Image (spheres, helix red, strand yellow):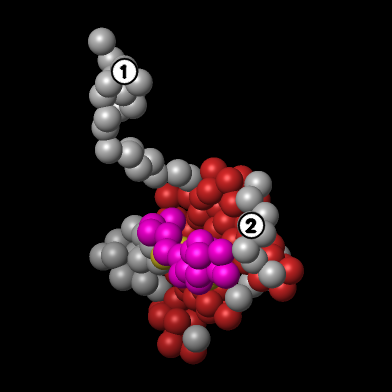
Amino acid sequence: AESSGLDTSAGQHEPPMYVDLSAEAIAVLAESDESPALSEAERQEVRRLRSQERRLSISQNAQRQLAGPYARSVSRSFRNGPDGIGYAVGGSISLDTTASSSPQENRKKAQTLRAAAMASGQPSASDMEAIARANQMEAKAQLEMARSAREEAIPVDEEGARSHAAATYESNT
């Protein structure tokens, strides 16, 4: 027989079982408990912390989804509320910003990373840094693609040497 870990048989006294609950489950349980031991100001602080935690969760989920395969670890910082519960009040998502094997892939990656950094609608300072890095990555990829296209368009003689006009053009750029 399969056991859920909870023994309800008569005469058996098991130690209490501790269960890891999701953040959403904790929020539901916490919202249902307007503890009379808290003052009105403390209850307002708890409501503010819950709201901040929800916004952070929504923002991080959107960024993680938009970053797709480039999203790595998620971290959060917590602050204890007056009710003794820790609320997520900040966080970050590490992203894979390493160069890909082709300029086309780098351009696509940069566009994906920029979209993820802008997902919250109110980018933080670190989001702005990520946007700037993505812009640089995309500009470099576009430059590499333009060089490649230009090299493909330059005529080559029988020995594989570029024409004099192409060499002169390149030395002037």
Residue 63, percent across and down?
56, 57
Distance between the alpha carbons at the discs numbered 1 and 2: 33 Å
**Residue depicted at 43% across the width and 56% down the height:** 71
Determine whether the residue tagged by mark 2 lies in a helix, strand or loop. loop
Magenta stretch secondary structure, dominant: strand
The residue type indicated by label 1 comes to: Ala
**Residue depicted at 55% across the width and 52% down the height:** 61
Question: Which residue has dot 2 on it?
Answer: 35
Disc number placed over residue 10 in the picture, else none:
1
Q: Nearer the viewer, residue 52 or 69?
A: 52
Which region is colored magenta?
71-87
**Residue depicted at 38% across the width and 59% down the height:** 73
Q: Mark 1 or 2, which is nearer the eye?
A: 1
Q: Nearer the viewer, residue 86 or 14?
A: 14
Residue at the front extreme?
Answer: 11
Residue 41 in view (yes/no): yes
Q: Nearer the viewer, residue 12 or 31?
A: 12
Which quadrant is home to the N terminus?
A: top left
The residue type indicated by label 2 comes to: Ser
Q: Are marks 1 and 2 in contact (CB under 8 Å)?
A: no
